[in-house]
């Protein structure tokens, strides 16, 4: 494990302490779980952005291919 020093805003720290007292969970565990969740969220958002960008790049080609398939269907 790595040691880390954080500066946390007073309001966030206070709210966290209230929640922790209800959960009966160590602060370190709570922060680790929060960071893990946030990392997953950020990875998902980065992937979504990448997929949107790549989708835009192939959109015109995909429409052309679709039109060609439609033309083949109607030719029969």
Image (cartoon, helix red, strand yellow):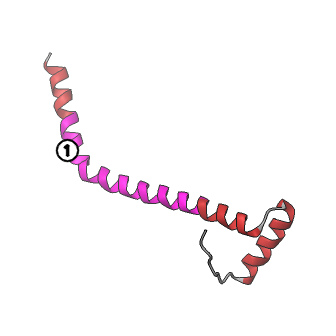
| Residue 75 location (% of width, % of height) | 13, 20
**SS state under label 1:** helix
Name the residue at the front extreme: 1
Quadrant location of residue 48? bottom left
Q: Closer to the camera, 49 or 64?
A: 49
Q: Closer to the camera, 75 or 49?
A: 49
| Residue 47 location (% of width, % of height) | 42, 55
Q: Which residue was labeled with disc 1? A: 61
Left or right position of 4 against 22: left
Quadrant location of residue 29? bottom right
Give, as a single range, the part of the protein colored magenta. 37-66
Total number of numbered discs in the rendering? 1
| Residue 46 location (% of width, % of height) | 43, 60
Which image quarter is the C terminus in? top left
Which image quarter is the N terminus in? bottom right
What residue do we see at 18% from left, 40% from top? 64
Q: Is residue 69 above or below residue 41?
A: above
């Amino acid at each position: 494990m790595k040691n880390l020093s954080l500066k946390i805003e007073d309001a966030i720290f206070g709210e966290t302490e209230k929640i922790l007292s209800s959960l009966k969970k160590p602060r370190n565990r709570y922060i680790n779980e929060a960071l893990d969740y946030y990392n997953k969220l950020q990875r998902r958002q980065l992937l979504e952005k990448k997929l949107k960008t790549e989708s835009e790049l192939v959109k015109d080609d995909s429409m052309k291919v679709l039109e060609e398939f439609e033309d083949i269907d109607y030719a029969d």
